[in-house]
Amino acid sequence: MAKSRIVNMSDDLYTACVARHESSLKYMSKEEKHDKLLALMIVEESVDYFWSSIMNGLDDTSKNESLSDVIVRCRSKTWKLHQFVICNRCQFFEAACRGPFSVHVQEAQDKIIVMDDDDPDCIGLMVHWMYTNFYSVGDVCTPQSIIAFNADVADMCDKYNLPEPAIAAWSCTAEHIAVDGWPDDFVADVDAVFTSGRDTKSYRQAENTIVEGFHRHRQTIINCLGQYEVSELFERNPRFGSKVAQKLLFSGK
């Protein structure tokens, strides 16, 4: 059993294990080091498998409404959830279900948490993250603009003190801009972000990210869209044009 598991372990896992435990292996003989590494790799693989099983189990739990003990409602959407998950993932939910103000809130007594001030798709993504630890927009919705949606999520995460999915949102935006297909979404991203009327930290960052992306890929974007469509885009979004002009002027490139 152990031997078969060892054989299946990759060179990358072995190298990573050596790097993590280098100091403790320094004074061992070659044979001792080999045996120690194999033991450590088995343990680490088992731990990884354990946490993977836990997260898969939580994902399955999220789909089993019969075990739910709290309802989250946002406008027309509802999620039947589990206090032991959401209260441990987010302080807001812990306060809503168990905290000092829960006794004064009717929805807490009814086990219904109303979040109508937020965007339902953003709440859906937060729920998905709490149960899976993955940030995956495509598993939740198909927004008109990925960048605008990620900015909305980041604002919501700041509101509920959830730094991890906020960081993941910006990583998602960076990956979105880096792919070859971004010019296909470029117009929708510019229109959504620069006409939103939102003056938040996340939207300001989204604007700067789009301008930086256009600056790096402007020739590709112009070639894909054509000069006329790009000119129309500047006319519709004068602040975008102004920021691009400043970037070109002061960057010297």
Image (spheres, rainbow, N blue to C red):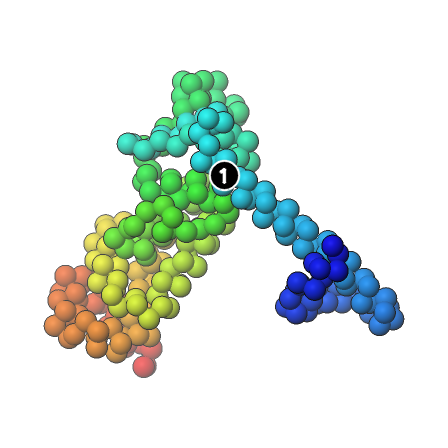
Residue 24, quarter of the rendered image: bottom right
Q: Position of residue 190 (x, y in %)?
A: 24, 61
- Nearer the observer, 208 or 35: 35
Amino acid type assigned to the residue bearing label 1 in the image? Asp
**Depth order, front residue of 28/219:** 28
Q: Secondary structure at mark 1?
A: helix
Q: Quadrant of residue 107?
A: top left
Q: Judge by depth and name the residue closer to the eye, 141 or 252.
A: 141
Q: What residue would you read off at disc 1?
A: 60
Question: If the image is split into quadrants, where does the N terminus sit?
Answer: bottom right
Q: Is residue 188 visible?
A: yes
**Mark 1 burial class by Cα count in 10 Å: few <14, some 14-19, many 20+:** few
Specify whether 1 is left or right of 119: right
Residue closest to the eye, 170 or 25? 25
Residue that appears at 26% across and 76% down: 220
Q: Is residue 42 above or below residue 123?
A: below
Quadrant where the C terminus sits is: bottom left
Quarter assignment of residue 233: bottom left
> What is the total number of numbered labels drawn onto the structure image?
1
Residue 78: % across, % down: 35, 31
Can residue 155 be seen by looking at this rendering? no
74 lies left or right of 55: left
